[in-house]
Image (cartoon, rainbow, N blue to C red):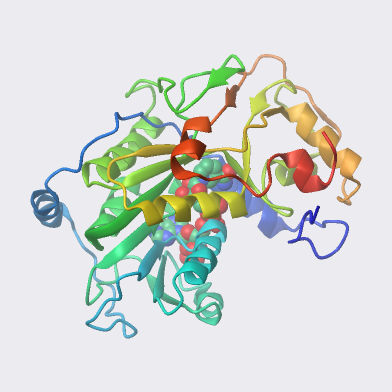
Amino acid sequence: MGIISCVTPNTINLTNTHILSYKRSCFPSLSYLQYPFQKPKNLTKIKSTLSSMATTNVEEPNPSSSNSVGENDLLIVGPGVLGRLVAEKWREEHPGCEIYGQTVSRDHHDELIKMGIKPSVKGTQFAHHFPFVIFCAPPSRSPDYAVDVRLAALNWNGEGSFLFTSSSAPYDCNDNGLCDEDTAVVPIGRSPRTDVLLKAEKLVLEFGGCVVRLAGLYKADRGAHIYWLEKGTVETRPDHILNLIHYEDAASLSVAILKRKLRGRIFLGCDNHPLSRQEVMDLVDKSGKFSKKFDSFTGTNDSLGKRLNNSKTRKELAWEPKYPSFARFLGISE
Ligand SMILES: NC(=O)c1ccc[n+]([C@@H]2O[C@H](COP(=O)([O-])OP(=O)(O)OC[C@H]3O[C@@H](n4cnc5c(N)ncnc54)[C@H](OP(=O)(O)O)[C@@H]3O)[C@@H](O)[C@H]2O)c1
């Protein structure tokens, strides 16, 4: 099979940027409340309420905005690794659409322009609202995540879809047990960090948007395996079960949800091949594709994980991942 098509060399050398970006995106505690599937609420009323709540910080007019909006135009809040893959897939399906990207800084605007994404910084006021909006910025750089999500929601015109990329962390399971879309989630108020995230997810659902709870994202040079390779020895237990989804698959799943124009729904994104931490690093070693060597997990008392299954999501959206497991991604037979 055409494995690791995104890996140019046969071995992968880590840079500090890879490690830092993974740490930033993954280690804020991601815990969320699960909400029942909801019917859309009165968008006009909600939008008017949100508008009055919003302290919109208009940083600049967006010179690239026009007064007209195409029916498939897309705003990506947080056009990072996942957001850019969503942009590529969206353009393949909707040639001629305009794609906009909102960031915290201007650091990557040149890259976005080269990809045909019209960049702006958050708080920018657009000349129009967008039929499709995806929020795929991690919480780590938001002083108030819910405010950022709310600003994104205010840029949605309510017609196509609004999708928030969340995490599978809220499912309340820490005994390596089975877990799916219907599993209960951690109670509200368990931790201040959780509450921040719950607020963001709740806002999206009340606004009529959808949520996709993603397992651990990875690609050749980014993800848990890269973080652990860099550390060498990690003080967590080896038998904790974790769940993965390749960035490309998270993008194709996001696009599948966006296209359906659903309201107030929660989906789960994972590859249905949970692995223990030790199994992940054994596969990395066996693949021979990484220049660094991992030493060991040394923890004994930390919590266990969960085994995710998203069969319901797959069936409803007629979606399957390109990379059915981490082993297959690495070209190792299971
Ligand atoms: N990593 C995981 O394992 C994992 C697991 C589950 C869910 N998720 C979720 O998956 C999504 C995508 O993750 P990713 O790894 O693709 O993210 P990423 O590459 O780290 O995203 C970085 C991008 O987001 C922008 N950004 C950061 N905070 C922002 C904010 N408050 N408002 C607007 N833009 C902001 C950055 O702007 P600059 O260009 O200025 O830096 C950059 O464009 C996130 O929602 C994350 O929470 C991740």
Image coordinates for residue 58, horizontal then vertical, percent: 24, 71
Question: In the rendered image of this protein, does residue 183 appear above or below residue 38?
Answer: above
Image coordinates for residue 282, horizontal then vertical, percent: 84, 33
> Which image quadrant is residue 202 in?
top left
Q: Quadrant of the C terminus?
A: top right
Image coordinates for residue 289, horizontal then vertical, percent: 87, 51
Q: Residue at x 23, y 68 (%)?
A: 129
> Which image quadrant is residue 103 in?
bottom left
Q: Please give left or right for residue 186 compared with residue 220 in the image.
A: left
Image coordinates for residue 79, horizontal then vertical, percent: 48, 63
> Which image quadrant is residue 135 in?
bottom left
Closer to us: 51 or 233: 51
Q: Residue at x 87, y 56 (%)?
A: 11
Is residue 268 among the parts visible in the rendering? no
Q: Residue at x 35, y 47 (%)?
A: 145
Closer to us: 277 or 192: 277
Question: In the rendered image of this protein, does residue 95 appear above or below residue 49?
Answer: below
Q: Please give left or right for residue 176 compared with residue 70 in the image.
A: right
Is residue 332 among the parts visible in the rendering? yes
Number of numbered discs = 0
Closer to us: 93 or 120: 93
Question: In the rendered image of this protein, does residue 290 appear above or below residue 325?
Answer: below
